[in-house]
Amino acid sequence: MAVLRLFASAREAAGTERASIDAPTVGAVLDEARARFGETFAAVLERSRVWRNGDPASVDDPVGPDDEIAVLPPVSGG
């Protein structure tokens, strides 16, 4: 199972900082996360960057049992 790590507003929307998800691709991991965590999380995900094992990810990238998928929302500040 891949580990989904959530940061900032994605973590707040999901109510957790990590989840284990069994899925064959990054896109399938994200689909499962949307189903688990709901509309608020899905809205944050639309604005977020997604990384697999420290590199930018595509929804078609394969996911193995030791992979980490990270959701990084934009950071505001000033």
Image: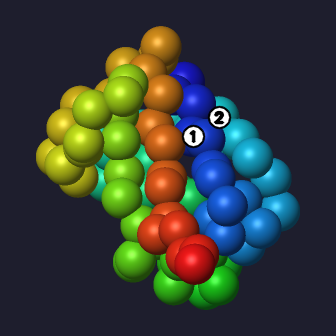
Residue 49's spot in the image, x, y percent?
36, 58
Residue nearest the viewer, comparing 36 with 12: 12
Sort mark 1 into few (<14), some (14-19) or many (20+) by Cα contacts within 10 Å. Answer: many
Mark 2 touches mark 1? (CB < 8 Å): yes
In this rendering, is residue 59 above or below 75?
above
Residue carrying label 1 = 4
Residue carrying label 2 = 20
Sequence-wise first label, 2 or 1: 1
Residue 55's spot in the image, x, y percent?
27, 32
- Is 69 placed left or right of 24 in the picture? right
Q: CA distance from mark 2 to mark 1?
A: 6 Å
Query: What is the total number of numbered labels drawn onto the structure image?
Result: 2
Tag on residue 15? none
Residue for point 45% across, 38% down: 69
In this rendering, is residue 31 above or below 78?
above
Split into 4 quadrants, where in the image is the N terminus?
top right
- Is 29 placed left or right of 34 in the picture? left
Residue nearest the viewer, comparing 22 with 17: 17
| Residue 57 occupies quadrant | top left
